[in-house]
Amino acid sequence: MYRDLDFDDDELIDELRDLGYNLDDYSLTDSEFRDLDFEGYTSEGADIILDVPYVPTDEKIVNAMLDLGEVTRDDVLYDLGCGDGRIVVAAALERNTRGVGIDVDPLRISEAIEYAAHTGVEYLATFIEGDLMEADFSDATVVTLYLLDLVNIQLRPRLLDELRPGTRIVSHAFDMGDWKPDQRQSCGSINIYKWIVPAKVAGTWEWRTTDGDTYRVELKQKYQQLSGKAWINGEEAVLKNALIKGDLIELVISKKANTRPVGFIMRSVGRELVAVEGGLQATPAIKILKN
Ligand SMILES: C[S@@+](CC[C@H](N)C(=O)[O-])C[C@H]1O[C@@H](n2cnc3c(N)ncnc32)[C@H](O)[C@@H]1O
């Protein structure tokens, strides 16, 4: 399908071919990608600077990214730096997913609009010309990226602050520095990565159980890694396990190292951690101190 697209008038693709890249399969390893000399490359006549050159994702990798992101018709997918729109169009065509592609290059946006129209998915696909560093992507439930790691890292605080907990981020070839991925998959020589945006739960929380005990935890958080301390009725206890995945938190606490632990599964809802059905938790956990 993607091979039908006409890239022949694309200067960068020609340059890449001249440089010896095998573009029958458009995938470049991350080091090949990083080595591209794209300084100042812009679409012809347009006064723009790209943070990342245009290199389209190969069809196989597009499908692997959609699988890794578990993309369904209920999602809203944003491709930041969408190129010719192939990820948004594939999600719409194959999974009925609504999508938004953002690219700073007007040539790419017109290709993407034409491609969506040609494949009959324009009712699901929106393409916006703009800078991904400034665009509003807060209603995404899945974000796809084929940028550079430095660009991912620059984008990272916005991804963590502006996306809802549970939103999946899937990146072709490039990681996010010290925000370790929740999953990594190899597709031949190419890696793809997935992160799940964690709720922000650092702080001191307190709740009561159906037994009348008061539990307190002091949680520290680095991305999706939690650690901390626990108390039961004011006495120091043992926080045996603290996990977060999106808006779900699991805490396992015991009175002493060798006593039977109690597990709590909570969902971050607004300013509270609300019990997920079936637990001992009688009241939502309330934040009593920020860290
Ligand atoms: C490597 S290509 C990826 C294209 C597409 N996402 C794909 O995977 O096939 C990167 C794209 O990012 C776009 N881009 C670079 N800097 C940008 C910026 N600051 N804002 C929006 N798009 C940008 C380029 O025009 C290019 O189309």
Image: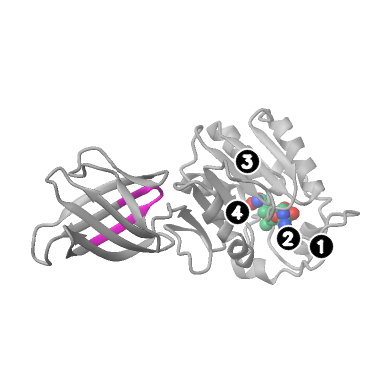
Q: Distance between the residues labelled 2 and 4?
A: 13 Å
Q: How far apart are marks 2 and 3 (CA)?
A: 19 Å
Tag 4 and tag 1, C-beta contact below 8 Å: no
Q: Name the residue under label 2.
A: 53
Look at the image and tell me whether residue 54 can be seen: no
Q: Name the residue under label 4.
A: 145
Horizontal side of 126 relative to 39 (left or right) equals: left
Residue for point 57% across, 38% down: 91
Residue for point 51% across, 32% down: 73
Of labels 2 and 1, earlier in sequence is 1
Residue for point 66% across, 69% down: 34
- The one nearer the camera, 94 or 125, is 125
Question: Is the residue indicated by label 2 positioned so its CB lies within 8 Å of ligand 1?
Answer: yes
Residue for point 32% across, 49% down: 286
Q: In which quarter of the image is the C terminus?
A: bottom left
Would you place residue 220 above or below residue 135 in this image?
Answer: below
> What label does residue 41 carry, if any?
1
Horizontal side of 41 relative to 280 (left or right) equals: right
> What label does residue 88 carry, if any?
3
Residue 76: give x, y in percent of width and height.
Answer: 56, 38
Q: Which amino acid does label 2 sit on?
A: Pro
Q: What is the span of residues highlighted in magenta in the rendered image?
A: 240-249
Tag 2 and tag 1, C-beta contact below 8 Å: yes
Q: Quadrant of the N terminus?
A: top right
- The one nearer the camera, 75 or 162, is 162
SS assignment at label 2: loop
